[in-house]
Amino acid sequence: MNTPTAKELASRFFPPRLDELPPEVLHALREHSKRMFGNQDRLEVAVAITRVELGRVNATDLHNEIKVATNRIRSQLLVMVELELLRPAGVENGKRIFERCNKNDPFWKFAVHEFETVLKETRELPGASRPAAARSRSKIS
C-alpha cells in the first residue's frame, strides 16, 4: 500500500484545490458567487481560507492557491474584516496577515457547502469534464 501524498490527504479532508478545476467549473463557481455574495471572487477566497488549517492567511499565498489577482483577493479579505469573519494579524515578511475570528462561524461551512453543491451540479451536466488531477489519475490506471 502506497503512502498518500500531502496533496492526496488534503483532497480527502478539504474541498478540491481550485487550481485543479476545469474552466467551466470555475465559471459556474464564479457565477454562483456573484449571485450569492454580489462578487465573483468571494466564494473562491472563502473556500481557500477554509483550506488553511491555522486560519492565518495573506493575499499573496491565497493568490498562489487560487490564481485570482492579489488585489482582488485583498479586497475580499478587507470585506471579510468588515464582516468580522477575519481580523488583521499584523505584517510578516512584508505580507499583511489576516486570521479567522471564529473557525466555527456558519459562514465558512456555508461557503464550503455552496462550493461543493456547484461542483456536484457541474459534474452532473452532460459533457462536463473532470478536474485535471482526476484526468491524470485515470490515464495511469
Image: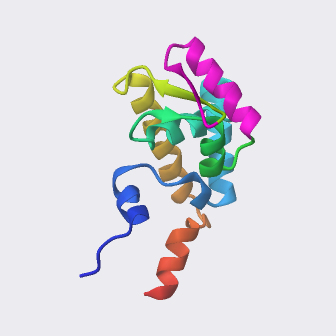
**Which residue is found at the position 49% from the left and 19% from the top?**
85
Query: Is 81 within the magenta?
Result: yes
Give the x, y percent position of residue 129. 60, 67
Give the x, y percent position of residue 12. 34, 57
Task: Confirm whether residue 79 shows in the render.
Answer: yes
Image quarter of the C terminus: bottom left
Give the x, y percent position of residue 127. 62, 67
Residue 8 as seen in the image, left or right of residue 128: left
The image shows residue 85, relative to residue 14, as above or below, that is: above
Here the colouring is rainbow
Give the x, y percent position of residue 113. 43, 38
Query: Is 99 within the magenta?
Result: no
Residue 82 as seen in the image, left or right of residue 5: right
Number of on-image labels: 0
**Which residue is found at the position 57% from the left and 58% from the top?**
125
The image shows residue 110, relative to residue 105, as above or below, that is: below
The image shows residue 82, relative to residue 109, as above or below, that is: above
Magenta residues, start to end: 70-93
**Which residue is found at the position 43% from the left and 33% from the top?**
55
**Which residue is found at the position 48% from the left and 26% from the top?**
99
The image shows residue 141, relative to residue 132, as above or below, that is: below
Outermost residue on the left side: it is 1
Residue 63 as seen in the image, left or right of residue 88: right
Task: Confirm whether residue 39 shows in the render.
Answer: no
Image quarter of the N terminus: bottom left
Residue 5 lies in quadrant: bottom left
